């Protein structure tokens, strides 16, 4: 009976004393309330009742930041959400410097997102997203560094605009497209007029070019399948009439 009781006590002792930590885990060991060291990964032996271990994961955490109501610098109300990627670099600080580093990082990310987005105008918020992400990452990393946390990346995911603002932006985009179309059309007309002026100058300098163009036009018309009958008249026959008209 004594041997059975001894075996049971040994098994209970080993069960409470032995811990196995995975490759991505670290154990912060407290002995009588005072921190002694961080151990892991692998087999960890604790003194029952005296030692207590807090397990900390070193894996990258992807934390979703809930949608926040933000008023931009130009007084436009929007909803913005984001995602924060971070990992614990110092398990000891993440345990003793902050009560719950996941909750604290989440709250800090929400307030920082509202603050940074509220300092810029809507156009900058929409077009300079990389700049906003960098500012968020730098601010969060600075404030979480004493907790032993490294913020790797912050990404603004979605910006929800009011319906009236979406309609106004759609009208603005449409007006911009119409303006560009008119500019392109005017540029085409200008280039065409410039080419015609150059062609007129060449024909004036070399009258034979008009005769060649005349023959080429006749060939193009005759190549089509139609019933049109053409009577080509040499342009030289019209020259005296043109000169008499100019003299008159």
Image: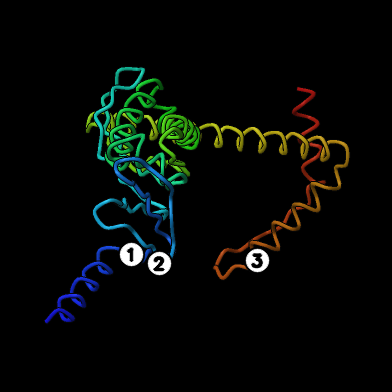
Q: CA distance from mark 3 to mark 1?
A: 98 Å
Which comes before the other along the chain, label 3 or label 2?
2
Q: Is residue 3 above or below residue 55?
A: below
Residue under numbered circle 2: 43
The quarter of the picture where the C terminus appears is top right
**Sequence-earlier tag: 3 or 1:** 1
The reply to whether the C-beta atoms of the residues labelled 2 and 1 are less than 8 Å apart is yes
Q: Position of residue 86 (x, y in %)?
A: 42, 46
Cα gap from disc 2 to disc 1, whole angstroms: 6 Å
For the residues labelled 3 and 2, the Cα–Cα distance comes to: 97 Å
Horizontal and vertical percent position of residue 194: 71, 34
Which residue is the site of mark 3?
222
Is the residue under label 2 in contact with that under label 3 (CB below 8 Å)? no
Q: Secondary structure at mark 2?
A: strand
Q: Is residue 205 above or below residue 21?
A: above
88 horizontally vs 228: left or right: left
The residue singled out by tag 1 in the image is 19
Residue 209 appears in the figure: yes
Relative to 228, is 81 on the left or the right? left
**Would you say residue 178 is visible in this rendering?**
no
Give the color scheme: rainbow, by chain, secondary structure or one colour: rainbow
Residue 185 appears in which quarter of the rendering? top right
């Amino acid at each position: 009976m004594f041997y059975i009781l001894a075996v049971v006590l040994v098994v209970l002792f080993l069960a409470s004393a032995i811990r196995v930590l995975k490759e991505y885990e670290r154990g912060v060991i407290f002995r009588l309330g005072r921190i002694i060291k961080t151990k892991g990964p692998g087999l960890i032996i604790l003194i029952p009742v005296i030692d207590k271990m807090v397990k900390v994961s070193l894996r990258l955490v992807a934390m979703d930041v809930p949608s926040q109501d933000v008023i931009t610098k130009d007084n436009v109300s929007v909803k913005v959400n984001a995602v924060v990627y971070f990992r614990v670099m110092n398990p000891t600080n993440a345990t003793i410097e902050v009560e719950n580093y996941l909750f604290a990082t989440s709250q800090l990310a929400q307030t920082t997102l509202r603050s940074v987005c509220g300092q810029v105008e809507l156009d900058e918020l929409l077009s300079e997203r990389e700049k906003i992400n960098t500012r968020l990452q730098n601010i969060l990393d600075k404030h979480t560094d004493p907790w032993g946390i490294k913020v790797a990346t912050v990404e603004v995911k979605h910006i929800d605009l009011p319906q009236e603002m979406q309609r106004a932006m759609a009208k603005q985009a449409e007006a911009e497209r119409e303006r560009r179309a008119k500019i392109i059309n005017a540029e085409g007309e200008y280039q065409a007029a410039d080419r015609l002026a150059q062609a007129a100058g060449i024909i004036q300098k070399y009258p034979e070019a008009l005769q060649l163009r005349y023959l080429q036009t006749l060939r193009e018309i005759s190549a089509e399948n139609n019933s049109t009958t053409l009577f080509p008249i040499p342009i030289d026959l019209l020259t005296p009439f043109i000169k008499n008209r100019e003299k008159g």
